[in-house]
Protein backbone atom coordinates (compact mmCIF):
# COMPACT_ATOMS: atom_id res chain seq x y z
CA UNK A 1 0.00 0.00 0.00
CA UNK A 2 2.88 2.35 0.73
CA UNK A 3 4.48 1.68 -2.66
CA UNK A 4 1.25 1.80 -4.69
CA UNK A 5 -1.19 4.61 -3.86
CA UNK A 6 -4.19 2.93 -5.54
CA UNK A 7 -3.93 -0.19 -3.36
CA UNK A 8 -6.43 -0.77 -0.57
CA UNK A 9 -5.58 -3.44 2.01
CA UNK A 10 -7.54 -5.41 4.56
CA UNK A 11 -5.17 -7.41 6.76
CA UNK A 12 -6.15 -9.94 9.40
CA UNK A 13 -4.39 -11.61 12.28
CA UNK A 14 -5.47 -13.74 15.19
CA UNK A 15 -2.90 -12.16 17.52
CA UNK A 16 -3.91 -8.91 19.21
CA UNK A 17 -0.21 -8.11 19.61
CA UNK A 18 0.37 -8.44 15.85
CA UNK A 19 -2.73 -6.34 15.10
CA UNK A 20 -1.52 -3.63 17.47
CA UNK A 21 1.96 -3.55 15.89
CA UNK A 22 0.45 -3.45 12.40
CA UNK A 23 -1.74 -0.53 13.51
CA UNK A 24 1.32 1.37 14.71
CA UNK A 25 3.04 0.75 11.36
CA UNK A 26 -0.03 1.93 9.45
CA UNK A 27 -0.08 5.19 11.40
CA UNK A 28 3.67 5.75 11.06
CA UNK A 29 3.38 5.32 7.27
CA UNK A 30 0.27 7.50 7.01
CA UNK A 31 -1.84 4.72 5.51
CA UNK A 32 -4.88 4.94 7.79
CA UNK A 33 -7.18 5.76 4.88
CA UNK A 34 -6.09 2.74 2.78
CA UNK A 35 -5.09 -0.06 5.18
CA UNK A 36 -7.31 -1.68 7.78
CA UNK A 37 -6.29 -4.45 10.18
CA UNK A 38 -8.91 -6.76 11.63
CA UNK A 39 -8.29 -9.03 14.60
CA UNK A 40 -9.97 -12.28 13.60
CA UNK A 41 -9.40 -15.86 12.51
CA UNK A 42 -8.40 -15.77 8.84
CA UNK A 43 -11.09 -13.79 7.01
CA UNK A 44 -13.98 -14.34 9.41
CA UNK A 45 -13.98 -10.69 10.52
CA UNK A 46 -14.00 -9.17 7.05
CA UNK A 47 -17.19 -7.34 6.09
CA UNK A 48 -19.50 -9.66 4.17
CA UNK A 49 -20.10 -6.88 1.62
CA UNK A 50 -16.44 -7.12 0.58
CA UNK A 51 -16.59 -10.82 -0.25
CA UNK A 52 -16.20 -11.39 -3.96
CA UNK A 53 -14.36 -8.10 -4.48
CA UNK A 54 -10.72 -8.93 -3.66
CA UNK A 55 -8.12 -8.88 -6.44
CA UNK A 56 -5.45 -10.66 -4.41
CA UNK A 57 -5.18 -12.62 -1.18
CA UNK A 58 -1.72 -13.19 0.24
CA UNK A 59 -1.01 -15.34 3.27
CA UNK A 60 1.84 -16.76 5.25
CA UNK A 61 -0.27 -19.19 7.28
CA UNK A 62 1.00 -21.76 9.76
CA UNK A 63 2.30 -24.35 7.29
CA UNK A 64 4.98 -26.49 8.90
CA UNK A 65 3.89 -30.14 9.19
CA UNK A 66 3.72 -31.05 12.88
CA UNK A 67 6.35 -33.78 12.49
CA UNK A 68 8.80 -31.25 11.02
CA UNK A 69 8.48 -28.66 13.80
CA UNK A 70 11.32 -30.17 15.84
CA UNK A 71 13.74 -29.81 12.93
CA UNK A 72 13.13 -26.19 11.95
CA UNK A 73 16.02 -23.76 12.51
CA UNK A 74 16.31 -22.31 16.00
CA UNK A 75 16.22 -18.75 14.68
CA UNK A 76 12.68 -19.52 13.52
CA UNK A 77 11.53 -21.75 16.39
CA UNK A 78 12.83 -19.37 19.06
CA UNK A 79 11.15 -16.35 17.45
CA UNK A 80 7.77 -17.64 16.25
CA UNK A 81 5.04 -19.06 18.49
CA UNK A 82 3.86 -22.60 17.63
CA UNK A 83 0.48 -21.13 16.66
CA UNK A 84 2.21 -19.32 13.78
CA UNK A 85 4.07 -22.41 12.59
CA UNK A 86 2.12 -25.64 13.10
CA UNK A 87 0.12 -26.42 9.98
CA UNK A 88 -1.15 -29.79 11.18
CA UNK A 89 -0.24 -33.30 10.13
CA UNK A 90 0.40 -32.47 6.47
CA UNK A 91 1.01 -28.73 6.91
CA UNK A 92 -2.17 -27.81 5.04
CA UNK A 93 -4.82 -27.50 7.78
CA UNK A 94 -5.04 -23.71 7.55
CA UNK A 95 -4.50 -23.74 3.80
CA UNK A 96 -7.66 -25.80 3.32
CA UNK A 97 -9.66 -23.23 5.27
CA UNK A 98 -8.07 -20.40 3.30
CA UNK A 99 -9.02 -22.00 -0.02
CA UNK A 100 -12.64 -22.04 1.06
CA UNK A 101 -12.43 -18.38 2.09
CA UNK A 102 -10.69 -17.40 -1.17
CA UNK A 103 -13.45 -19.04 -3.21
CA UNK A 104 -15.87 -16.56 -1.62
CA UNK A 105 -13.61 -13.53 -1.25
CA UNK A 106 -11.77 -13.28 -4.57
CA UNK A 107 -13.46 -11.76 -7.57
CA UNK A 108 -13.39 -13.83 -10.78
CA UNK A 109 -9.81 -13.78 -12.07
CA UNK A 110 -8.49 -12.75 -8.64
CA UNK A 111 -5.32 -14.43 -7.44
CA UNK A 112 -3.91 -15.95 -4.30
CA UNK A 113 -0.33 -16.45 -3.12
CA UNK A 114 0.41 -18.55 -0.05
CA UNK A 115 3.75 -19.40 1.49
CA UNK A 116 3.76 -23.15 2.20
CA UNK A 117 6.20 -25.86 3.23
CA UNK A 118 8.07 -27.29 0.26
CA UNK A 119 6.87 -30.82 1.03
CA UNK A 120 3.22 -29.69 0.79
CA UNK A 121 3.17 -27.85 -2.50
CA UNK A 122 2.16 -30.71 -4.80
CA UNK A 123 -0.83 -31.51 -2.60
CA UNK A 124 -1.65 -27.80 -2.27
CA UNK A 125 -1.74 -27.46 -6.06
CA UNK A 126 -4.04 -30.51 -6.27
CA UNK A 127 -6.35 -29.06 -3.60
CA UNK A 128 -6.46 -25.66 -5.31
CA UNK A 129 -7.39 -27.20 -8.65
CA UNK A 130 -10.02 -29.40 -6.98
CA UNK A 131 -11.47 -26.24 -5.39
CA UNK A 132 -11.90 -24.68 -8.85
CA UNK A 133 -8.78 -22.51 -9.01
CA UNK A 134 -6.80 -22.30 -12.25
CA UNK A 135 -3.14 -21.77 -13.12
CA UNK A 136 -2.17 -23.29 -9.75
CA UNK A 137 1.57 -23.79 -9.45
CA UNK A 138 4.52 -23.44 -7.09
CA UNK A 139 6.99 -20.57 -7.28
CA UNK A 140 10.51 -20.61 -5.89
CA UNK A 141 11.57 -18.22 -3.13
CA UNK A 142 14.67 -16.04 -3.41
CA UNK A 143 16.84 -18.94 -2.25
CA UNK A 144 15.57 -21.05 -5.16
CA UNK A 145 13.42 -23.34 -2.99
CA UNK A 146 9.82 -24.08 -3.90
CA UNK A 147 7.84 -22.07 -1.37
CA UNK A 148 4.79 -20.20 -2.70
CA UNK A 149 1.58 -21.51 -4.21
CA UNK A 150 -0.06 -19.14 -6.66
CA UNK A 151 -3.42 -19.64 -8.35
CA UNK A 152 -6.34 -17.68 -9.78
CA UNK A 153 -10.06 -17.93 -9.25
CA UNK A 154 -11.65 -18.98 -12.53
CA UNK A 155 -13.40 -16.21 -14.49
Image (cartoon, grey):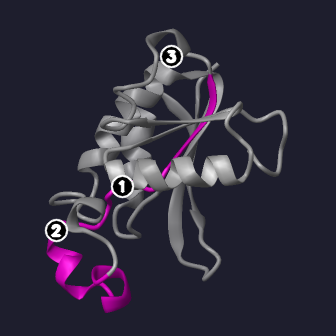
Residue labelled with disc 1: 17
Q: Point out residue 59 in the picture as x, y percentages from the top left corner.
A: 48, 49
Instruction: Point out residue 71 in the picture as x, y percentages from the top left corner.
Output: 23, 87
Can you tell which mark lies on residue 66? 2
Which mark is nearer the camera, 2 or 1? 1
Q: Can the viewer see residue 11?
A: yes
Residue at 32% x, 58% y: name it. 62
Residue 51 badge: 3
Q: Is residue 32 above or below residue 149?
A: above
Residue at 61 percent across and 80 percent down: it is 144
Q: Quadrant of residue 61?
A: bottom left
Label 1–label 3 contact, CB within 8 A: no
Q: Considering the numbered disc 2 on the image, is that residue within a helix, a strand or a loop?
A: helix
Q: Earlier in the sequence, mark 1 or mark 3?
A: 1
The region drawn magenta spans 54-78
Precedes in sequence: disc 2 or disc 3? 3
Of 131 and 23, nearer the camera is 23
Q: Nearer the viewer, residue 56 or 17?
A: 17
- Residue 43 rendering spot, x and y as whole percentages: 39, 31
On the rendered image, what quadrant is the C terminus found in? top right
Tell me if label 2 and label 1 are in contact, CB under 8 Å: no
Residue 38 lies, with reference to residue 22, above or below; the image says: above
The residue positioned farthest toward the top in the image shown: 49
Amino acid sequence: AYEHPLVRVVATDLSSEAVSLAGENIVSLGLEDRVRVVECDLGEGIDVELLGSFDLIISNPPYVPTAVLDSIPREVADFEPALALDGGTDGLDIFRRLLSFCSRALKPGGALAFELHETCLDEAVRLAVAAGFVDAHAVDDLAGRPRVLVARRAC
